[in-house]
Image (cartoon, rainbow, N blue to C red):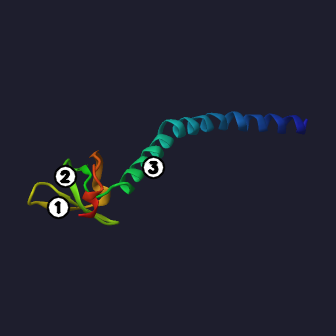
Amino acid sequence: MWLAETAAAGGSIWMTLAPFVLMFAIFYFLLIRPQQKKQKQRGAMLNALKKGDKVVTVGGLHGTIAEITDDTVVLKVNDVTKLTFDRSSVNNVTAKSESPSLEKS
């Protein structure tokens, strides 16, 4: 009799935990995994930045990278104006630099 009660209790524990495991799996595949992919793509984009790329910042400012370091990016907005931003404030690249001569100048 004691063995039958233990087996029944063990089965009910799994039946109680099954919805939580299922909810975690759904959250993982619908929320966590896609967010990790986006972060990985963003990190690759930030690492691939180079002088001459045309970018848009998080605040919506359009410019061309004039100088770049590990932490900062200097954007050339027009012929005279240069602004310094954190590298992480670059939202996306609109056009890659076309010639390697831009990187050396």
Q: Which mark is residue 40?
A: 3
Q: Is residue 3 left or right of residue 63?
A: right
The reply, left or right, for residue 79 in relation to residue 49 is: left
- Percent from the top left, x then y, of residue 15? 70, 33
Q: Say which residue label 2 marks.
A: 63
User: Can see residue 54?
Assistant: yes
Give the CA separation, mark 1 to mark 2: 9 Å
The amino acid pointed to by label 2 is Gly
Residue 79 % position (x, y): 9, 57
Which mark sits nearer the N-terminus, 1 or 2? 2
The image shows a total of numbered marks equal to: 3
Q: Residue at x 27, y 52 (%)?
A: 53
Can I make out residue 57 in this image? no
Residue in the image at 29% along x and 48% along y: 96
Cα–Cα gap, marks 3 and 2: 24 Å
Q: Which residue is mark 1?
A: 83
Front position in the image: 100 or 84 = 100
In this view, 25 is above or below 92: above
